[in-house]
Amino acid sequence: MMLFFIGIIEMFIATLWTKAVTETKVFASGFITMINILIWYYVLQTIIDNINNWYLALFYAFGCALGTSGSMYFFKIIDKKIKKHRKKCVLNSQDALKVIE
């Protein structure tokens, strides 16, 4: 059951890593990679120690699927809020320019 939650967290981190890389955030992407490797080490160790328990891999896969979907939805909402805020700031700036003229 622990691997289920780790799968969720790992996919959130993987989505965050992808976002950091596409935005060319060098330090952040390197740091996130280190955390992801440590998580992978734990996952591999746990699955190898319990190699006959295929339910662990199944729970991990479900957690990864949920983590991917959830983190994509989360970042979609965040991006919409950021765009809305930026648009609002631009509109306020244009109103300020009209007052100055």
Image (cartoon, helix red, strand yellow):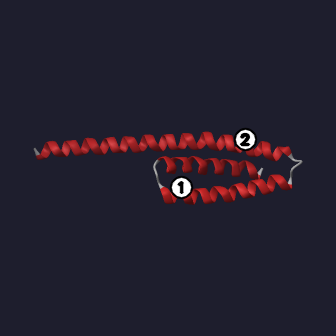
Callout 1: helix, strand or loop? helix
Q: Outermost residue, left direction?
A: 101
Number of numbered labels in the structure image: 2
According to the image, label 1 marks what residue?
A: 29
91, above or below 28, in the image: above
What residue is at 55 percent from the left and 58 percent from the top? 30
What residue is at 56 percent from the left and 60 percent from the top? 31
What residue is at 79 percent from the left and 45 percent from the top? 57
Disc 1: CA contacts within 10 A as few (<14), some (14-19) or many (>=20): some
User: At which x and y percent is residue 74?
Assistant: 54, 43
According to the image, label 2 marks what residue?
A: 62
User: At which x and y percent is residue 61?
Assistant: 73, 42
Q: Locate residue 32: give its quadrant.
A: bottom right
91, above or below 40, in the image: above
Q: In the drawing, does residue 6 fall left or right of residue 48? A: left
The kind of residue on which mark 1 rests is Ser
Sequence-wise first label, 2 or 1: 1
The kind of residue on which mark 2 rests is Phe
Q: Locate residue 82: give its quadrant.
A: top left
**Quick one: quadrant of the C terminus?**
top left
User: At which x and y percent is residue 8?
Assistant: 66, 47
Callout 2: helix, strand or loop? helix
What residue is at 69 percent from the left and 48 percent from the top? 7
User: At which x and y percent is residue 55?
Assistant: 83, 44
